[in-house]
Image (cartoon, grey):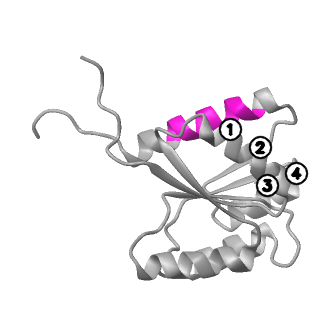
Amino acid sequence: MSAALPSRHLCVLLVDDNPADCLLAQEAFDLHADQVSVKVIQDGSSALDWLRAQAARHSLPDVVLLDVNMPGMNGFQVLSAIREEPAFRHLPVVMLTTSENPEDIERAYDLIASSYLVKRPDFSGFLEQVEHFVRFWVQVRFRHRSGTPS
């Protein structure tokens, strides 16, 4: 008998202004469609509005993937706003960016990012990153405790 799969999908909010990057991310996540669903929003302000609406419905995503470099509200401003909002300050936020700048990494963790993931430049490398991301967050979100309590 094989191990049971999670009873529901991992819900990921991807916030990234680059349409090409969003398309590549959707293609990568589609390979894991049996485990994850992705909502894509292309600007920080709209992402915060969506999160507020989801919080009112008690239907927040399991994890947010957030680009650093966006026009208008950048990823740091969005992360800061998420951490200031009581309804969803607990959400895991993973910065997904091309920036390897140590100052960006430090700033993200100062703002309480859950993780900082530098996008691999090659699609096969990015597919591997997405696979690891999905595996980790599915395990975190849907971990089972087998047996009876001791």
* Mark linked to residue 14: none
Q: Are marks 3 and 4 in contact (CB under 8 Å)?
A: no
* Mark linked to residue 24: 2
- Kind of residue indicated by mark 4: Ser
Which residue is the site of mark 4?
Answer: 99
First of labels 3, 4 by sequence position: 4
Identify the residue at horizontal 10%, vertical 37% (top origin): 148
> Crowdedness of circle 1 by 10 Å Cα count: few (<14), some, many (20+)?
some
Which residue is the site of mark 1?
Answer: 28
- Kind of residue indicated by mark 2: Leu
Q: Are marks 4 and 2 in contact (CB under 8 Å)?
A: no
In the image, taking residue 30 as reference, residue 124 lies left or right, namely right
Residue 70 image position (x, y, % from top left): 85, 67
Does residue 12 belong to the magenta stretch?
no
Residue 104's quadrant in the figure?
Answer: bottom right
Dominant secondary-structure state across the stretch colored magenta: helix
First of labels 3, 1 by sequence position: 1
User: The N terminus lies in which quarter of the figure?
Assistant: top left
Q: Measure how far apart labels 3 and 2 are at the Cα level.
A: 23 Å
Query: On screen, 63 above or below 117?
Result: below
Q: Are marks 2 and 1 in contact (CB under 8 Å)?
A: yes
Q: Which type of secondary structure does the marked residue at label 1 adopt?
A: helix
